[in-house]
Image (tube, grey):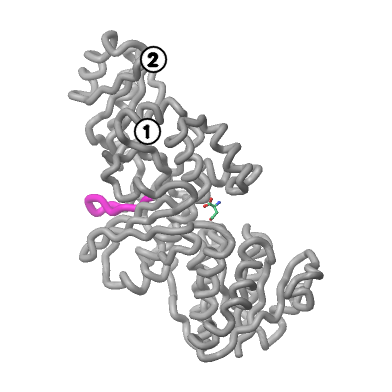
């Protein structure tokens, strides 16, 4: 039998306990031994729950108990989770976590400690909730040179953008609805500013390249500047706008960024709507593969944690995934990345289109009836060059209302 301690009995932690209890027989059959919950660490008491007699308030009870084989960290944040997880690994216990902030900030060190102690630090649930993506990257696609990972990695922003696209809602109204439904936090900054997606793409890129990725080096733009007018154009163009976290190898250079991107119905991620996540992986032999499913939520996320617990239990005396090294992945400047740009310009098209073409060359134009503005779709241009062209347009007196990267 293996004993588990769960640190943090919130949404995901309670889901982990629920699955370990409800699927107890199936888990024991597959692992050929029972996996039992010995402790639940939380500040609160849970008197009428199945774990009432397992609640502890002192971390030392867990770290000092030699009978605890595997520790689940579902507290979130990095304090005190980092010091708790580090102490557990140093004490020779495997750890399974859903905490992307912890993995993105301290993954390199925690993986090293796990390898030294011949235990496991596993974090399938930290990206894409219940979608298997970490293990496929290091196991099923181990032979591949990964050329691109592009994902819709945040359910909250995908819900907001889907509402704006389908129902013509403003960003503020869609955010309010997401908050009422419990998808968005009262302080939604981490989701809507792209910080959550940034940590997730940093983790995926590190797994894919075997090198450390500093999430602070990743260009990150959220969705707060996307408006209902943008979606009126998108509707007319048969496109949508999605928040992408992406890392790509282009001309031998590595890029990683988070930004809203306008895409057409042809794009494989176009159909990923509502709170769902979708991740596209391109390998040099594989071509493109897609992973789709519930990127958040109690049981989907807990399911990924439980699979990690089972993996750790089966591999009690060896490290199944050593992770990435401390060598840093050199990321190229966003100015070198190439995109098309959807650009909204104030005023009548007749007034300034010739001027725009003189700077941008031949461009498609889109006019919204009844609006004193129009939009153009540029050719593929490096971001640095685009900045210069944009400045040139502004010097000519044009008012640029919006710029969204486009992959059309
Ligand atoms: N806030 C995250 C999301 C939760 O909306 O996707 C899952 O990481």
| 61 lies left or right of 279 | right
Which residue is the extreme one toward the top?
351
The residue pinned by badge 2 equals: 371
Vertical arrangement, residue 219 with respect to residue 378, above or below:
below
- Report which residue position mark 1 lands on: 404
Say which quadrant the C terminus sits in.
top left
Looking at the picture, tell me which residue is in the foreground, 89 or 246: 246
Residue sitting at x 53%, y 82%: 27
In-image side of 119 versus 345 (left or right): right
Image coordinates for residue 391, horizontal then vertical, percent: 34, 22
Q: Determine the residue positioned at 45% across, 41% down.
A: 162
Q: Where are the magenta residues, as a range?
A: 246-253
Q: Is residue 345 above or below residue 204?
A: above
Q: Is residue 328 visible?
A: no
How many other residues sit within 10 Å of disc 2, few (<14), some (14-19) or many (≥20)? few
Image coordinates of residue 340 in percent, x first then y, are 27, 35
Q: Is residue 252 a member of the stretch shown in magenta? A: yes
Would you say residue 192 sits in the magenta stretch?
no
């Amino acid at each position: 039998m293996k004993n588990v301690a769960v640190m943090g009995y919130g949404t995901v932690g309670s889901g982990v306990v629920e699955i370990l209890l409800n699927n107890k027989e199936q888990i024991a059959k597959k692992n050929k031994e029972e996996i039992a919950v010995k402790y639940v660490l939380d500040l609160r008491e849970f008197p009428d729950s199945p774990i009432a007699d397992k609640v502890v308030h002192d971390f030392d009870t867990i770290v000092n108990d030699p009978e605890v084989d595997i520790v689940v960290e579902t507290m979130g944040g990095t304090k005190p989770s980092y010091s708790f997880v580090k102490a557990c690994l140093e004490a020779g216990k495997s750890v399974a976590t859903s905490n992307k902030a912890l993995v993105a900030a301290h993954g390199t060190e925690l993986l090293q400690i796990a390898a030294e102690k011949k235990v496991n630090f596993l974090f399938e649930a930290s990206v894409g909730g219940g979608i298997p993506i970490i293990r496929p990257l290091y196991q099923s696609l181990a032979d591949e040179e990964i050329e691109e990972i592009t994902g819709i990695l945040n359910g909250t922003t995908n819900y907001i953008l889907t509402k704006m696209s389908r129902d013509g809602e403003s960003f503020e109204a869609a955010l309010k609805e997401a908050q009422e439904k419990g998808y968005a936090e009262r302080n939604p900054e981490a989701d809507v500013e792209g910080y959550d997606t940034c940590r997730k793409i940093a983790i995926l890129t590190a797994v894919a390249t075997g090198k450390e990725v500093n999430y602070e080096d990743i260009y990150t733009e959220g969705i707060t500047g996307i408006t209902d007018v943008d979606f009126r154009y998108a509707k007319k163009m048969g496109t949508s706008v999605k928040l992408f976290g992406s890392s790509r190898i282009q001309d031998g250079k590595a890029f990683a960024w988070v930004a809203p991107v306008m895409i057409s119905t042809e794009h494989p991620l176009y159909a990923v709507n509502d709170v769902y996540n979708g991740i596209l992986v391109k390998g040099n032999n594989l071509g493109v593969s897609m992973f789709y499913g519930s990127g958040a939520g109690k049981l989907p996320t807990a399911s990924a944690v439980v699979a990690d617990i089972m993996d750790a239990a089966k591999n009690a005396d060896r490290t199944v995934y050593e992770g990435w090294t401390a060598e840093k992945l050199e990321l190229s400047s966003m100015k070198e990345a190439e995109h098309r740009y959807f650009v909204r310009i104030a005023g009548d098209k007749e007034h300034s289109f010739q001027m725009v073409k003189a700077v941008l060359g031949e461009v498609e134009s889109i006019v919204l009836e009844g609006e004193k503005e129009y939009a153009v779709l540029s050719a593929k241009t490096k971001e640095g060059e685009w900045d210069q062209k944009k400045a040139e347009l502004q010097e000519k007196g044009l008012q640029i209302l919006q710029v969204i990267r486009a992959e059309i």
